[in-house]
Image: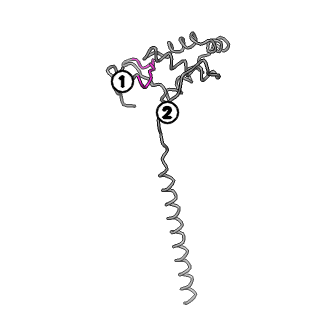
Amino acid sequence: MSESNQNNENVVNQNQNITNNNQVKKNKVVKREKKVKNNEDYYVFIMPEKAKSLRTIVEQRIIEIIREEPLIHEKELILKLIARDPKVKEYYVKTQDISYLQFIIWDMAKQGIIKKAKMLGDKKHVYFFLPEQEEMLKEKFIKVPKK
C-alpha cells in the first residue's frame, strides 16, 4: 500500500508541475501579445531627380501626376508616366510592357500611399487619388461595403 501511495503522490506532483509549466507558458504568450507596434504616420519627400532606381522614380512620378490631376484613370496615369520621365520611357521602349508599372501602382494602393476608387456602374475602370485629396473629393464619394 505504501508503494501505491507514493506512486499516486508522484503522479499528482508531476501533474501539478505540468499545469504550472502550462500556466507559465500562457503568461509568456500573454506578455508577447501585449507588445503593440506603433503605427505612426511618417513623412516622405518627393524628389524624382534624386531617385536612382526605376521603381523609386515611378512611385515619385505617380505622386506628382496624381497631385496635379486627382481621380485619374489607370491608363491615363501610365501614359502620363511614360511621357513625363525619360527613364520610364526608355524602359517602356525597351520592354514594350506596362505590367511592371501597373504592379507598382497597385502595390502603392495596397500600402495606402494612394487610394483607389471605382465609378458607380463602371466595374472595369479604377481611378486613383491621394489620401489628402479625400476631403476635397468627399462630396463625390459614397462608401460601398465589400462583397
* Residue at horizontal 45 percent and vertical 23 percent from the top: 130
Displayed quadrant of residue 11: bottom right
Mark 2: few, some, or many residues within 10 Å (few <14, many ≥20)? Answer: few
Nearest to the observer: residue 97 or residue 135 = 135
The amino acid at mark 2 is: Tyr
* Sequence-first disc among 2 and 1: 2
Residue 62 percent across, percent down from the top left:
52, 19
The reply to whether discs 2 and 1 touch (Cβ–Cβ < 8 Å) is: no
Of residues 86 and 73, the one nearer the viewer is 86
Residue 42's mark?
2
Q: Is residue 126 magenta?
A: yes
Q: Residue at x 47, y 52 (%)?
A: 34
Q: Is 38 above or below relative to 22?
A: above
Q: Residue at left 45%, top 15%?
A: 72
Near-viewer residue (54 or 48): 48
Q: Secondary structure at mark 1?
A: helix
Q: Position of residue 1 (x, y in %)?
A: 54, 90
In this rendering, the answer to whether 108 lies above or below 72 is: below
Q: Tell how many labels.
A: 2
Amino acid tagged 1: Glu
Q: Which stretch appears magenta?
A: 122-132
In the picture, the disc for residue 135 is: 1
Quarter of the image with the C terminus is top left
